[in-house]
Image (cartoon, helix red, strand yellow):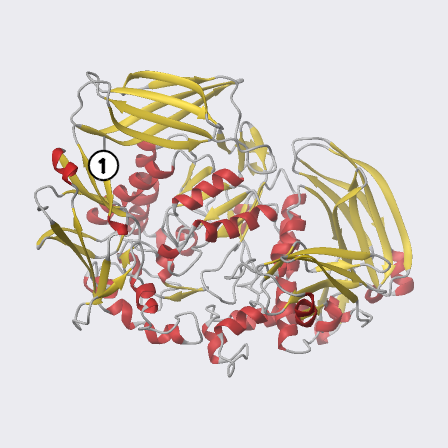
Amino acid sequence: MRLALDLGKTKWQFRQSATRSPWREASVPGCVHTDLLRHKLIPDPFHGTNELGLQWIEEADWEYRTSFTVPAEFGRHEHVELVADGLDTVATLTLNGRELARTENMFVGHRWDVASHLRTGRNELHIRFGSARRYIQTHRPEHRPPVEFNDPVGGATRLRKQACQFGWDWAPRLVTAGVWRGIRLEAWTGVRLANVRVRQEHAGSRVRLTIDPELCGTEGGQVCRVVLSFEGTEVALAEGHAAGLTLEVPRPRLWWPVGQGEQPLYKLTIELRDPASGRQVDAWSRRIGLRTIELDRHPDKWGESFQFHVNGRPVFIKGANWIPAHSFVAALTRADYERDLRAAVAANMNCVRLWGGGIYESEDFYDLCDELGLLLWHDFMFACTLYPHDDAFAESVGVEVEQQVARIRHRACLMLWCGNNEIHSCNFAALNDPVTREGYEKIFHTLIPDVLARTDDQTPYWPSSEWHGEFTGGYPEGERRGDTHYWDVWHARKPVSDYERWHFRFCSEFGMQSYASAETMAAFCPPSDRNLFGAASENHQKNPFGNQIILDYVTRRYGYPRDQESLIYLSQLNQAYCMEVAVEHYRRNRPRCMGAIYWQLNDCWPVASWSSIEHNGRWKALHYAARRFFAPLLVSARVLGDERQGKGNYRESTVTGAVELHTVNDTPRAVRATLRWELSLLDGRRIRGGSKSVSLAPASARLQAKLDLAREIARHGRERLILRYGLVVAGTTVSEDTAFFAPPRFLELPRVEPRILVEKTDARHARVIIHSPVHQHRLSFEFRGIPHHADDNWFDVHPGEKAVVSVELARPATLAALRRSLRHQSLATAQ
């Protein structure tokens, strides 16, 4: 049986090499920044402008060491190996004074036979991590890509390392070093199970599994025993020699993405046994989901479809892009991942896109996606910039891809392998050069597909995101086929209404920035510098034009903010509005469009960004809005016409009162519902209303009603009216929203304070009850200084009704403390 000694549980030390500083305790897995911070040798990199003073860390060499005693039973095995799952990045390993190996790829695991290096008693392992910057300066100088968007120093793509560590337009430049994944000794004899490939064949109600163990060592007719169990009960068994074992699964329970069905996970165990003694030699065990996933690209009247079928059923993809959840990823725990991934499910998402400028994630991340039913669009770790393609680089990439695919391919959540993020679209002109294109195609059109053909031919592959099927570009092509990143709303400062101009087949990136909340800002800014445009906040805004663009969009739609907190509020309100316009447009246009993945779900540090969840887990307005606009049953209003500033800055409006009411049903079931609408004055007086019984076919979008409110607008004025609309199923409102007929900055909003009551339900839970005699648009509340999560926020409060919200407290708080800390804001109070 294979033995293992976890070296992460031994005592590690670290120091800076050149200074010969004293050895200090270190954490493994970990990184040099967190070790320095633990010993108070550096200030908090996330606070103020501290990041700027810590760039010396990437210029230094760092040493880590540990000592260990090899258990006696290891010596009775043929092989004793040092296994390192991840070294970051330019590492030289020495064992008992003898150089063992050198590495230069953060994403490659290593296995070295060290039997001849070990000795009786104490052994010392020493790892020297060379400066990443010095490596970049001295290696592949001929590789000079024409565009390096986010790396202020340049050259980061010469080294296979997490790209966003070198800086991104939402990330600090904090280039780490260290043992960032597990490290251990393993001992074994004869043969070991290196990995197992599992293929699924679905035919009608039958599922057949084909098991191909990948063995390493001296094969001697070993026998494999394969057991499939569900919730502790064995459901299928097979025995035989190592290649091509099959299992027939009786009464298979299929895995579905969340919102489409359940997520049953089977346990698959492969035991490798000695044929003579029957003794177990090695074992491999994983959880799998029984399902099929297909990328359907069939010709249709618009061009070519781009939709995912799960178990034969087309699924509209609703989600957000995932970036590394911390600048120091080695310290992340399952709880960290669970907080944000559960929040994605709570917002009615069924997918996350693992973006290519980060990392291949931890097992905790993939476990949670499997358990929660979150489909995973998985980029390989290449982003935006052209990469080297020399033979040595390509060989390293080939090993990386093969290892990561073998590690992840069995995952139920895995929807798509994608070659890279935006390299094609960011380097469109450069790729017209035949030599440059040949190098690009070598990696993304030849090497990676060849590896996948050998290792995972059941998961679809797409060479880049965005990509339209060939070396063509432009948004018109995205209306015909492929996936699109639409950034004219934001980078090009196009009006928000431009989202509705385009009818993309699948939109895998689009976004709008907002500021982090005032409480989050206070955590990273010193009290003397809490101006949004001061030095500390400016260092936490990594887009060079970010503040300008936020202000541009806010002032187009909203009135002048009353103070800084109102500006923060309006920036988040605007972000939520922009994403609502985009997502509801994409959803109304199914099946032409079959996916909307906004940028981005999470943050790696406290920052002004496109995220819907702040670094500390706090939901922005966008995340609460996402739960509404991603709802499985949706009513969506489209107010026809637009308002812009014309010549002489005079208002020009084509809004006449024509409104379309659409419904969307993403579920696999037909639904009968009632569509309701009501037109009111902003002070609460009802003008007109109506209702209609509607039928929502499974997996459908439909225009259900057209309203003509021209007479009411002519009589009362666009600035005084609000349209409320909802979808009611079996007496329960499942979707509801409001619409205006003029930009909110011109609305005649009554400034009347709502009545807010706070009640304690137990030590860790409270209830907030809100009444208002007038309409309150997107009222938000918080208990300042008391960590908490509200089950709803940033909602409308309607006259004569009460809103009741449940609040979970991170720690007990008294009722008096809650009442003292209560803060609230609405559109009327912010502008």
**Residue 149, image x, y percentages:** 39, 63
> Is any atom of residue 640 visible in this view?
no
Q: Is residue 749 above or below residue 734?
A: below
Identify which residue, 634 or 101, lies in the foreground: 101
Q: Picture quarter containing residue 211?
A: top left
Q: Is residue 144 above or below residue 242?
A: below
Tally the marks.
1
Identify which residue, 564 or 382, lies in the foreground: 564
Quadrant assignment for the C terminus? bottom right
Q: Residue at x 38, y 56 (%)?
A: 331
Q: Which residue is mark 1?
A: 3
Q: Picture quarter containing residue 634?
A: top right
Q: Is residue 281 above or below residue 304?
A: above
Q: Residue at x 27, y 51 (%)?
A: 8
- Judged from this view, the residue extending furthest toward the bottom is 528
**Residue 165, image x, y percentages:** 36, 61
> Is any atom of residue 262 visible in this view?
yes
Quadrant assignment for the N terminus? top left
Identify which residue, 510 or 789, lies in the foreground: 789
**Residue 745, image x, y percentages:** 74, 70
* Residue 143 appears left or right of 599: left
* Residue 772 appears left or right of 149: right
Q: Picture quarter containing residue 267?
A: top left
Q: Residue at x 59, y 69 (%)?
A: 785
Q: Residues within 10 Å of mark 1 (few under 14, many from 20)?
A: some
Mark 1 lies on a secondary structure that is strand
Q: Residue at x 34, y 76 (%)?
A: 53
**Residue 340, image x, y percentages:** 52, 52
* Residue 612 appears left or right of 53: right
Q: Residue type at mark 1? A: Leu
